[in-house]
Image: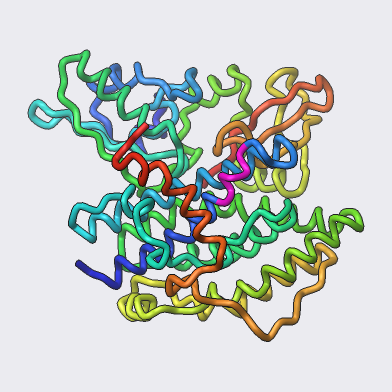
Amino acid sequence: MNTNLYNYILGIADNSLILGQRLGELCGHGPTLETDIALTNISLDLFGQVRSYYQYAAKIAGDDRNEDTIAMMRPEREYVNVLLVEQPNTDFAYTIARQFLFDMYHFMFLKELQNSNDETLEAIAKKSIKEVSYHLRFSSDWVKRLGDGTEESNKRIQNAINDLWAYTDELFYQTEADEVMIVEGIGVDVSKLKEQYYKQVSEVLNEATLEVPDLKYFQKGGKQGIHTEHMGYILAELQYMQRAYPNMSW
Amino acid sequence: MNDLMIEHADIDTELIPILDQVSDPEIPVLTILDMGVVRYAKLVDDLVLIKITPTYSGCPAMDVIGDDITTAFKKAGYKVNIDLILTPAWTTDWISEEGRKALEDYGIAAPLEAGADKDVLLNGKQLVKCTNCGSQNTKLVSQFGSTACKALFKCEDCQEPFDYFKCLK
């Protein structure tokens, strides 16, 4: 089995799985019907993309692993999503800020992954980017509405951006598997996207009349499987059914 | 079935009547051929090989569509093998003319061209026609509607809400 490729795929897919799970928590709890539906639709897109990645990972593993066991049965330390996506739905502003900070990265990443030497990753990227361009529109739009809205909405989205900013640098951190995949022309060199990311994020924040945080210290660890305290709770909910009733299906 | 559809997909003519019986479970007025999700259908010896592609990655209709295709071919006396493919990625351009008309009659506004779609969703331009009264005095309510492929609109004249099928290129 090509361990680097397997780990590389998980590094992409786990972000979408955990963010999709976070958004799924809002099903029936969105602040308005329209935003509720939008957030769960984004969640559904992410889960759809995740299935394609995990199916491919299972094929590479070539053993008794399948998309479900990869998604549901790993211990916490084996999930390699970035810390940003596991942060909680503190309020609507946090949900939107987290989405926006991830969508901008996700869109830029998929744009490059379309040029991957790996045919399957290229195909998934070409499919997913169409969906993610809608996610980015949605979240950018809401950042502007909240930032340039009322005093209260401005305060809340600014707080959320300030708090979540510490998790943005990790998006551009590269693991060993990432490095190998870049050399082989399969993976994306995300370090090259960093400058452009902060530039484009700042443009939206400026338009939203929000301050761009000035931070020197950033959090990381998720890509090595070292997560924040929130991760255990997410996995408890995500894995409960498969742990309680192994191999159950609907 | 229009020419565009045949141009982009590789489907044996004799299999078309069977495929035409299978409709999209979420938009039952459309057949899967109208939607353009069937990319390949060939009879090889006594086995029908079919390739379908999802409209959106997370489209929950794909499993049902697969089952419905299997049932339709079984009924017609064929064995069938279905593959899900991702490339080339589905685009709203593959919805047939008949399909677009069926959508409109069903109350879903058909997708506009990419440029116009962007103007509608981002710049608030009034280009989508109300499926109820035909007025162009319409307003975007949400970029995501009842399913991932649709946006929610409202007519400012007749006040009816309706779905718009988003352009996907």
Quarter of the image that includes the N terminus of chain A: bottom left
Residue at 20%, 52% in the rendered image: A64
Measured from the top left, where is residue B18 in percent x and y? 28, 18
Q: Residue furthest left?
A: B45
Residue at 26%, 19% in the rendered image: B71
Residue A249 vs residue A207, the one in the foreground = A249
Part of the protein shown in magenta: A22-27
Q: Considering only vertical position in the picture, is B125 above or below A133?
A: above
Q: Considering only vertical position in the picture, is A151 above or below A196?
A: above
Residue at 61%, 61% in the rendered image: A87
Q: In which quarter of the image is residue B105?
A: top right
Measured from the top left, where is residue A207 in percent x and y? 81, 64
Measured from the top left, where is residue B110 in percent x and y? 59, 30
On whether residue A108 falls in the magenta region, the answer is: no
Q: What's the colour scheme?
A: rainbow
Q: Is residue A49 visible?
A: yes
Measured from the top left, where is residue B55 in percent x and y? 45, 39
Q: Is residue A114 visible?
A: no
Q: Considering only vertical position in the picture, is B73 above or below A130?
A: above
Q: Which residue lies furthest to the bottom in this view?
A: A216
Residue A221 vs residue B22, the one in the foreground = A221
Q: Could you tell whether B9 is left or right of B28 in the image?
A: left
Residue B43 vs residue A178, the one in the foreground = A178
Quarter of the image that includes the C terminus of chain A: top left
Q: Considering only vertical position in the picture, is A106 above or below B18?
A: below
